Amino acid sequence: MSNQSELPQQNNNQYDQYEIEGENIIMKSIDENVLAGYNTGIEKNRLHIDFGLIEFARTKEILMEHLPKPPATIYDIGGGYGEYSWWLTSLGYELYFMGMHLTKV
């Protein structure tokens, strides 16, 4: 990751630079308050209770309608706690996961 002073700043937004498969990618930094909220674990079991069960089932249906058949490579960017990544891996997909922090999955 590059020094923040070297990266663009627009409308008081901070940016981070990452190298992914040899390419430099610049993305808006994650707001510290948003990151703090996710770090509390508030989202951890959301897809396994109440309306989350319906959301999880329907999203899997939609994904199966649009994804190529395995084996295929999928990048799960912002994948929360990895529920969809674990499920897709079990179906034979190769997954690359990028969440908000390393302690989620």
Image (cartoon, helix red, strand yellow):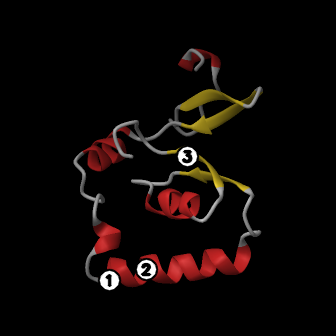
Question: Dots 2 and 1: beta carbons under 8 Å?
Answer: yes
For badge 1, the amino acid type reads Phe
Relative side of 73 to 1, left or right? right
Question: Is the Cβ of the residue at disc 3 closer than 8 Å to that at disc 1?
Answer: no
Q: Please, what is the three-letter code of the amino acid marked with disc 2?
A: Glu
Give left or right: position of 47 versus 59. left
Q: Earlier in the sequence, mark 2 or mark 3?
A: 2
Q: Amino acid at mark 3?
A: Phe
Residue drawn at the location 63% of the way across and 16% of the way down:
6
Residue topped by disc 1: 51
Q: Nearer the viewer, mark 3 or mark 1?
A: 3
**Which residue in the structure is indicated by mark 3?**
97
Q: Few, some or many C-alpha atoms within 10 Å of disc 1 (few <14, some 14-19, many ≥20)?
A: few
- Tell me where residue 94 appears, x and y as whole percent: 66, 51
Residue 60's x, y, as percent? 54, 76
Q: Which residue shows up at 74% across the image and 31% down it?
A: 21
